[in-house]
Image: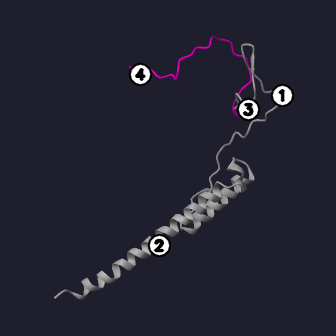
């Protein structure tokens, strides 16, 4: 004679599996929502130092708290300060010329926050992709 446990397991197992499937579907829906929010125009690209970046950080910190992650950042928060060079100021003073050709700012080139001013002379060497593979 079969044990009552086997019968109970046969009845309960599909219910547990269905609950797990629904739970997985809920998790997928939540992940989609999170990604859509973080990628939304409201966050303006989340560029460092902007209101969009602050909104994204607050959203992520709230999510961390809701799943029980312990804050180990600065002042017992989820954040940690780090040095940030900022965004360079673009304008008439930014120029790049190769030979006699003046390159258009932001279309052909962009300075980095740590870029320096100066003049360089030399020969341009085309080396493909810089890959040497025998």
**Secondary element at image label 1:** loop
Q: Is residue 81 magenta?
A: no
Task: Give the mark nearest the N terminus, 1 or 2.
Answer: 2
Question: Can see residue 72?
Answer: yes
Residue 106 numbered mark, or none: 3
Task: Give the mark nearest the N terminus, 2 or 4.
Answer: 2
Real-space Cα separation, disc 2 to disc 4, in angstroms: 51 Å
Give the main secondary structure of the magenta stretch: loop
Residue 92 numbered mark, or none: 1
Q: Choose between 114 and 34: the one closer to the eye.
A: 34
Span highlighted in magenta in the image: 112-134
Badge 4, how many Cα within 10 Å: few under 14, some, many 20+?
few
Q: Quadrant of residue 19?
A: bottom left
**Secondary element at image label 4:** loop
**Secondary element at image label 2:** helix
Real-space Cα separation, disc 2 to disc 3, in angstroms: 48 Å
Tell me: 90 left or right of 112: right
Residue 133 numbered mark, or none: 4
């Amino acid at each position: 004679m079969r044990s009552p446990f086997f019968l109970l397991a046969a009845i309960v197992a599909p219910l547990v599996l269905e609950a797990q499937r629904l739970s997985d579907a809920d998790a997928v829906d939540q992940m989609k929502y999170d990604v859509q929010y973080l990628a939304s125009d409201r966050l303006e690209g989340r560029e460092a130092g902007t209101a969009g970046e602050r909104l994204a950080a607050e959203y992520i910190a709230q999510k961390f708290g809701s799943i029980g992650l312990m804050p180990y950042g600065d002042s017992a928060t989820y954040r940690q300060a780090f040095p940030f060079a900022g965004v360079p100021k673009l304008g008439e003073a930014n120029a790049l010329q190769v030979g006699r050709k003046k390159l258009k700012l932001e279309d052909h080139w962009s300075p980095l926050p740590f870029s320096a001013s100066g003049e360089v002379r030399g020969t341009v060497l085309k080396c493909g992709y810089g890959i040497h593979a025998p």
